[in-house]
Amino acid sequence: MIDQSLLDAVKSYSENMTRPISFVLGTGEHEKRAELVDFLTKIAGTTDKIKFELDQADYIDSSLPSPISFAVRSHIDGEVVDNGIVFSGIPGGHEFTSLILAILQAGGHTLKLDVGIQKLVKRFNKPLEFQTYVSLSCHSCPEVVQALNQFALLNDNISNEMIDGALFQEQVEANNIQGVPAVFLNGKPFANGLIDTAKLIEKLQEQFPDLLSEGGDDSEQLEQQDVTIIGAGPAGVAAAIYTARKGLKVAMVADRIGGQVKDTQDIENLISVPLTTGTHLSADFEKHLQEYNITLKQHVTVKEIDETEEENYSIHLNTGEQFETRSIILATGAQWRKLGVPGEEENIGKGVAYCAHCDGPFFKDKDISVIGGGNSGVEAALDLAGIVKHVTVLEFADELKADQVLINKAKEKDNIEFITNAATQEIKATDGKVSSIVFEDRNTGDTHERDLAGVFVQIGLVPNTDFIKGFVDLNRFGEIEIDERCRTDRKGIFACGDVTTVPFKQINIAMGEGSKAALSAFEYLVMQ
């Protein structure tokens, strides 16, 4: 289950712990319990900072949810403290990182959250009991689990239980879960699919308007910046590095480094790199950013931008923080476009999905549909073809838009079918789960209904410009209007990447546009 290289890594990481932690196990019988006990025993055996002695009562707790549930608890001033962090299942696969971070952070290692976010979470005054259902093969799930675990460490009102859906099928079926991560709050559905820390906080504040206690921290705000980059995808990262190399005072505000790239699997068209993944490229972005003096405000979103009397700009963050900047580079990228048909929104996580890699395993040996015949749609079909029984790709246009190499690969698969000129009309559900899709043949006008268990939507992107509508000029698609130097209609504000009118939303193009925006911003500041 756990090889020696991973155990050696745990031993190395434990050197960063400043206090011991304990594994505390639930009671009862389960076919996986012996495997879990062996797993925890081997991890605890790497260091004396991790305690687990199954023959002692202090390491057993009947209040834990199941026989294969365990808590990660801190030793503080001679007492064992319940942090509210529970793992139900054996956190291998991608969730092994979540366990290691929980151990380190419960052991006193620095949290990964922005200081402003930490101060905000500490002010949450409601009991918040999270349950996060995951798949160990899901690359998006750990981001949610790790964020909520940190929330629990910061605030005694908060707890989070990671639940391996494969080992708790009865709960998965009872809750009609067909997509991960699936987050429940106080026993009710809260969020489904990849949701970053900033969005989690926004949803909490929307659901609980009185969530924050009075008396926020009045610590010193960030000093005035020369350039503030909003967004940390390929365009934003390039802009930050280029401006920092010019010796400017640079801040970057981002919900997460990598943006949409982080959700991408194989990347084969990054020039000079024959093959990489979104996860690896995002990690490389972060490593490169750390080479420069850039103030990074990660897991944070911008709520508003104001112009000051000095003709600078004031940035308002969702943490309540505010600071001034002489110029801005908007690189907020885009998000998955939705169909906007009946049955889509209400069935997200119940058969409607946007990530084939994350949610594909829920549809093993079932019939599904992919909406969209572009690169993302055909790539999704190829990913799913090895898992599901049959894939129907519905494309609105009269021909597929994907690269020919992808189309050729897909046509080699016996269980992938293409239907062009197909306009999706409705997604139907039965007993809380997707059961069929209705589409119109645009050639004949005939309506067809096809029985299936899942619909994966892959129809392109929508620019993330809601927070700046009315502040800079947008086109009819919501993209930021820019000129050849990445200038917007407002002095000192530049934009780059997928959020702009520049055609062809590609990583290589975004990096070039980010570099260009940075040089234009530098030129603007020099001329002031």
Image (tube, rainbow, N blue to C red):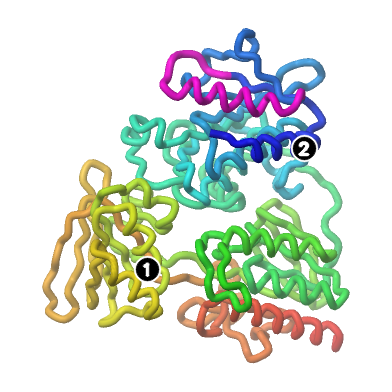
Single out the residue that lies furthest toward the front: 4
Q: Position of residue 472 (x, y in %)?
A: 61, 79
Single out the residue that lies furthest toward the bottom: 484
Asked whether, in this view, residue 92 is left or right of residue 22, the answer is: left
Residue under pointer 2: 109
Q: Amino acid at mark 1?
A: Gly
Asked whether, in this view, residue 483 is left or right of residue 169, the answer is: right
Q: Amino acid at mark 2?
A: His
Q: Position of residue 116 (x, y in %)?
A: 74, 49
Number of marks in the image? 2
Depicted 247 relative to depicted 17: above or below:
below
- Secondary structure at badge 1 equals helix
Residue 49 image-quadrant placement? top right
* Residue 37 highlighted magenta (yes or no): yes
Residue 81 image-quadrant placement? top right
The residue carrying pointer 1 sits among few (fewer than 14), some (14 to 19) or many (20 or more) residues within 10 Å by Cα, namely many
Between 260 and 302, the one nearer to me in the picture: 260
| Residue 382 visible to an observer of this rendering | yes
